[in-house]
DNA sequence: GAAACGTTGACGCCGAGTTGACGGCCGGGC
DNA sequence: GCCCGGCCGTCAACTCGGCGTCAACGTTTC
């Protein structure tokens, strides 16, 4: 899942980003509202973790712009003041969820996962297809009931394939969703990850190649 | 679907073209407005992806000429400045849709598909005829409920036949719509693609030959 | 500091796309 | 009725880009 963290406090921003990366998400970080809008133009994020009190462009305004664009990205708003008024204000602006500071990181992670599920309408909490069971919350994968330990990248790629629900996903789309913006589109890291995934998932093969198009599950 | 990409930035142009080709479209690329007008004279495009800020002839002028010619080609305008004024100007000139730079590629692909659907009035998102079900978005084909894996060319040709809705389509028309301008009209690539299509689609035959005219579905 | 992980370069294979060749079918001309 | 020629289907061969894989290097993690 591709996530943008917008937070002007550098230490907090990095902490959140690292934690989300550990959950196998691809995370970009910016420190003000202007930069956030730029990134949101270029990349197709699933979730935006948005601090409310931002320099350059206020969090509320970022939220407003997103809502007006009918962006598919879900917004989790972070607010320093934890009172009810702010909560209502945030949701009215188009935020999808709201978390008062300070917060426990697991709380944030859980809400981000939940929002990611809502981005694809009616997606169940546990993805299941072709004998593969993937639990985003526990970060676990089972093949025909057998536990399969996966690395972060492998997990992220498999999760994207499962979200596509059997449709083909191009290497570029996988790069977009499972890698952050530093990824180099001209290399073959995706191929390698697919290779390792196939090995760990065992026989019979479930990750199929659609030549000239991408990969899909079956 | 036949698409013309007009963009003076070479890297961006190629990126867009490649992505659209992966969606089984036939894509030509030119880098200035003059060349665009030449191509539009010669070929029958379904969609034109048109950068606004072009050398030789400005994108606005290309758009004007197209509108005045009552061309069937739909125009997706790309604009650097994302403000409302430009949007209004673009649509007033006859552009059918408008996308501010920078943009995420999937966004562009989605809009191109939507415009292509509008070119044939009232075409549904999923094409279905004679037991063939073709989903352009997922790039999947089913014959009587059975999944049929197709290559890009095969998929493109079948999509054109389905768009014709049972009418005969000549080999020349197929070349025009499913191949880019490098295709050699004196060879028989179309025949070969039809041959493979027939094999993959199985019995009873659905792709019929209308002698002296072309091919049609039934 | 060791082990797991991610990335990169190199290499070989396979299949899609194309092309040339050939043969059957059909219609028209003599 | 016979021959000729165009149209079309099919087979085989070739080319080339995409893809899988091995090995090695740099990086992160515990």
Image (tube, coloured by chain):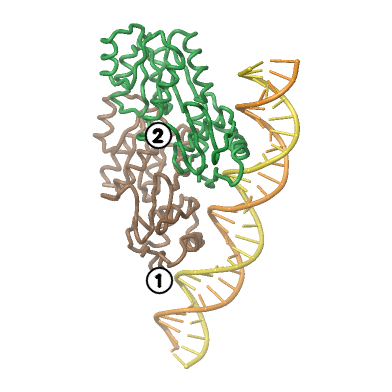
Chain colours: A green, B brown, C orange, D yellow
* B183 in relation to A111, above or below: below
Asked if labels 2 and 1 share a chain, the reply is: no
Q: Residue D30 falls in which quadrant of the image?
A: top right
Q: Which residue is mark 2?
A: A124
Tag 2 secondary structure? loop
Q: Position of residue B192 (x, y in %)?
A: 51, 62
**Left or right, A36 with reference to B15:** left
Tell me the residue at 26%/38% (across/down). Answer: B94
Residue closest to the eye, C27 or D27: D27
Q: Residue D20 falls in which quadrant of the image?
A: top right
Q: Position of residue B111 (x, y in %)?
A: 35, 38
What subunit carries mark 2?
A
Residue closest to the eye, B27 or A52: A52
Q: Residues within 10 Å of mark 1 (few under 14, many from 20)?
A: few
User: Disc 2 vs disc 1: which is toward the camera?
Assistant: 2
What subunit carries mark 1?
B
**Left or right, B194 with reference to A195:** left
Tell me the residue at 54%/45% (across/down). Answer: A208
Marker disc for residue B211: 1
Tell me the residue at 50%/39% (across/down). Answer: A170
- Judge whether residue B58 can be spotted in this image: no
Total labels: the figure holds 2
Q: Residues within 10 Å of mark 2 (few under 14, many from 20)?
A: few
- Judge whether residue A15 can be spotted in this image: yes
Tag 1 secondary structure? loop
């Amino acid at each position: 899942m591709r996530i943008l963290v917008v937070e002007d406090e550098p230490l907090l921003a990095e902490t959140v980003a690292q934690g989300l990366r550990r959950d196998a998400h691809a995370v970009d970080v910016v420190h003000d509202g202007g930069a956030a809008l730029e990134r949101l133009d270029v990349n197709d994020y699933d979730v935006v973790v948005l601090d409310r009190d931002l320099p350059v462009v206020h969090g509320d305004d970022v939220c407003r712009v997103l809502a007006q664009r009918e962006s598919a990205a879900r917004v989790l708003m972070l607010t320093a003041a934890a009172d009810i008024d702010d909560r209502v204000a945030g949701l009215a602006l188009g935020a999808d969820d709201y978390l008062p500071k300070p917060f426990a990181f697991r709380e944030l992670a859980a809400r981000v996962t939940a929002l990611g599920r809502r981005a694809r309408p009616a997606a169940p909490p546990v993805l299941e297809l072709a004998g593969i069971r993937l639990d985003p919350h526990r970060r676990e994968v089972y093949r025909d009931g057998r536990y399969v330990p996966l690395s972060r990248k492998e997990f992220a790629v498999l999760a994207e394939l499962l979200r596509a629900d059997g449709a083909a996903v191009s290497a570029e789309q996988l790069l977009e969703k499972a890698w952050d913006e530093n990824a180099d589109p001209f290399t073959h890291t995706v191929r390698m990850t697919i290779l390792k995934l196939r090995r760990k998932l065992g026989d019979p093969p479930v990750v199929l190649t659609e030549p000239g198009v991408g990969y899909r599950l079956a």
